[in-house]
Image: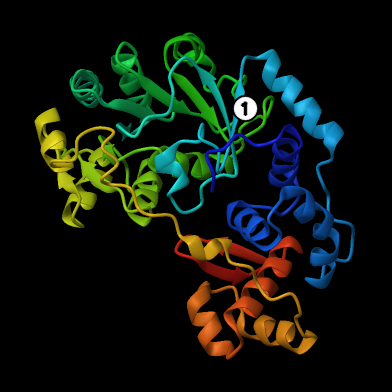
Amino acid sequence: MTAEPLPAAERRDRLCLSLSENVGPATYRDLMAKFGSASKALAALPELSRKGGLSRPLRLCDADEAHRVFDEAASIGARLALLGEASYPTLLAHAEGAPPALWLRGSLEPSNSALAIVGSRNASAAGLKFTRRIAAALGEAGLIVVSGLARGIDSAAHEAALATGTVAVLAGGLDVIYPPENAKLHAAIAEKGLLVSEMRPGSVPRAEHFPRRNRIISGLSRAVIVVEAALRSGSLITARYAGEQGRDVLAVPGSPLDPRSEGTNRLIRQGATLVTSADDVLEALGSMAPNSGAFLREPDEEIFSTPAASIAERDRERILSLLSPTAIGVDDLIRESGLPAASVLGILLELDLAGRIVRQPGNQVARI
């Protein structure tokens, strides 16, 4: 990755690549590693998807569509940050599953001194009070508060940190207000804080977008604090992503009689740091000063290596026979296949573009 400014044509092509069918974060990185530029990757997509078994043309984003997206973004005051650019959040860039493109709107810049606070939409009065108290205190301590602009705990965290700095990650486009009752808060964060989304402007949030949003919340943050969460909740999904991304998970204990505390109490039993005050959070962060960069992982340079160009059909069949709906690690797949790593990575790239596999956290893949 480079902090050098990208030419306008390459920025356009990278946006096109990110918006093309079946190009997720892992596939995007593999394509950039293999071809070195978005224009070359775009040109190769039809043939790669055909080799992977797709019987119809792959839907590609073209230059005209990209220009329309740029115009839509400009009309709402949004700016694009591409993976590899200096404007892309550093913490997120080092996290697994980092989106190829992010849309940003607001006066605040992404910061390495960010910490997420998430919790129940149907929050208790005590949970809301605690959230406001801890968010304000952490803001005063120099930390930026990240959350998902949902009802309940998320909203309380944003409101309390608005004066010191808050980032709202959205499941839809930056111009789509959800939930509707947060219209004023949405506008206030756009003015004083930062709105973030991987979805193009105008995108209406769907159920499958929220877990993707949650991985960005954790990826932008040094740690994740869960205030209230039922056993089946989006907040626990965020906590899981945090663990997978190497972030600290902290949880606020609650009454065993309140279902909204079942998730947080379980997190504590599983090893999450117990939090009762902002001091507990600052102590957990240890001696790492905000913006020190000491907590950053080095990028995985292996993803930028060039896979082998020639792949035999029997090798594709071998990989397909080993794959199943049960996810397997790519390293395990390479060992079981007996094929060179470059060949396996190339085959997985083709199958991914054909929509025949799904990538899962932890560098795992499963057959669809």
Q: Residue at x 55, y 31 (%)?
A: 197
Task: Tell me the SS state at disc 1.
Answer: loop
Pointer 1 local density, CA inside 10 Å: few below 14, some 14–19, many at least 20: many
Question: In this orientation, does residue 368 appear?
Answer: yes
Say which amino acid is labelled 1: Gly
Among the 4 quarters of the image, the one containing residue 353: bottom right
Residue 246 location (% of width, % of height): 32, 53
Q: Which residue is mark 1?
A: 173
Asked if residue 329 is positioned above or below residue 340 in the image, the reply reads above
**Image check: 44 left or right of 18?**
right
- Foreground pick, 84 / 101: 84
User: How many numbered badges does the structure rendering display?
Assistant: 1
| Residue 57: x %, y % from top left | 89, 57
Q: Does the rendering let one see residue 122?
A: no
Instruction: Give the quadrant of residue 146.
Output: top left
Please give the name of the residue rendered at 65% of the width and 37% of the height, measured from the top-left corner: 6
State the quadrant of the C terminus.
Answer: bottom right
Residue at the far front: name it.
4
Camera-side residue of 313 and 214 = 313
Using the image, determine if residue 189 lies above or below residue 28. above
At x 61%, y 32%, the residue is 205
- Is 134 rendered above or below residue 301? above
What percent of the width, then of the height, locates residue 26? 58, 57
